[in-house]
C-alpha cells in the first residue's frame, strides 16, 4: 500500500478543513444580495477534499491484497513530485518581487521541462499563452489584483492592467 500517498492525502484533508473554517472567519459577512468572499474558496476546498477522499479510496482499492512496500525517503527527495514542490515554493517566494506574470511564466516553463517537454519554443510559447490567460481571467474578469512586483516588473504589470481596463471599457 502506498502509505506516503495516503498520509499526504490525509494531511491535506486536515489542512483543507482548517482552511475551510479560516476562510469563513477571516472573510467579511455576505450581504443578502451577494455570495460573499468566502463562497468560492469554500467551494474549491470542498471539491479538493472530495478529490482527496477519492484518491485515498482509489489507492486502497488498487493495493488491496498486495505486499506492503517500504517507504523510500531518499527516492522521494529525488522524485519529480518533490522537485515540483520546490518549484511551487520558489514561485511563492519570488512572486512579491518579480510579480505574477514573471513568476508564473518561469514556473510554467520550469514545470513543463520537469515533466519532460523538450521542445523549448513550444514550451515557452505555451507558458506565455497560459500566463496571459490566467492573468486576463483573474485580473480582467474577476478583478482580483495579482502581485505586481517591484521596479520594471511593477511597471510592466501596471501597463497590462491599463490595457485590460481599456479593453473592458471598450476603447
Image (cartoon, helix red, strand yellow):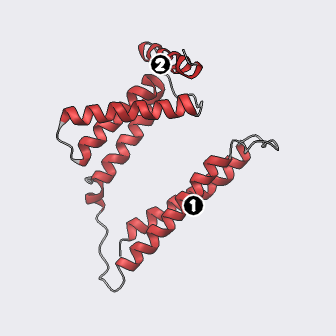
Q: Splitting the image into 4 quarters, where does residue 122 fall?
A: top left
| 142 or 2, nearer to the observer | 142
| 105 or 7, nearer to the observer | 105
Q: Splitting the image into 4 quarters, where does residue 37 fall?
A: top right
Q: Is residue 20 left or right of residue 35?
A: left
Q: Nearer the viewer, mark 2 or mark 1?
A: 2
Quadrant showing the N terminus: bottom left
Q: Position of residue 125 (x, y in %)?
A: 28, 31
The relative height of residue 68 versus residue 162 in the rendered view (above or below) is below
Quadrant showing the C terminus: top right
Residue at x-position 34% and y-position 30%: 128
The relative height of residue 52 versus residue 164 in the rendered view (above or below) is below
Q: Secondary structure at mark 2?
A: helix
In the rendered image, which residue does mark 2 sit on?
160
> Which class describes the residues within 10 Å of circle 1: few (<14), some (14-19), or many (20+)?
few
Residue at x-position 38% and y-position 66%: 4
Report the Cα–Cα distance between label 2 and label 1.
38 Å
Q: Is residue 68 left or right of residue 19?
A: left
Q: Splitting the image into 4 quarters, where does residue 141 fall?
A: top right
Q: Position of residue 55 (x, y in %)?
A: 44, 67
Q: Residue furthest bottom?
A: 65
Residue at x-position 32% and y-position 34%: 127
Residue at x-position 50% and y-position 22%: 148
> Which class describes the residues within 10 Å of circle 2: few (<14), some (14-19), or many (20+)?
some
Mark 2 and 1 residues: CB-CB less than 8 Å, in contact? Answer: no
In the rendered image, which residue does mark 1 sit on?
14
Amino acid at each position: 500500500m502506498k502509505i506516503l500517498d495516503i498520509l499526504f492525502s490525509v494531511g491535506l484533508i486536515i489542512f483543507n478543513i482548517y482552511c475551510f473554517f479560516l476562510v469563513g472567519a477571516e472573510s467579511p459577512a455576505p450581504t443578502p444580495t451577494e455570495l460573499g468572499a468566502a463562497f468560492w474558496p469554500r467551494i474549491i476546498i470542498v471539491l479538493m477534499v472530495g478529490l482527496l477522499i477519492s484518491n485515498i479510496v482509489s489507492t486502497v482499492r488498487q493495493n488491496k491484497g498486495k505486499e506492503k512496500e517500504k517507504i523510500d525517503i531518499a527516492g522521494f527527495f529525488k522524485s519529480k513530485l518533490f522537485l515540483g514542490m520546490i518549484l511551487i515554493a520558489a514561485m511563492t517566494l519570488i512572486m512579491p518581487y518579480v510579480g505574477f506574470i514573471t513568476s508564473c511564466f518561469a514556473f510554467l516553463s520550469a514545470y513543463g521541462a520537469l515533466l519532460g517537454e523538450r521542445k523549448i519554443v513550444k514550451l515557452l510559447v505555451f507558458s506565455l499563452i497560459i500566463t496571459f490567460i490566467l492573468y486576463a481571467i483573474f485580473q480582467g474578469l474577476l478583478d482580483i489584483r495579482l502581485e505586481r512586483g517591484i521596479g520594471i516588473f511593477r511597471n510592466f504589470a501596471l501597463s497590462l492592467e491599463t490595457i485590460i481596463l481599456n479593453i473592458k471599457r471598450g476603447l
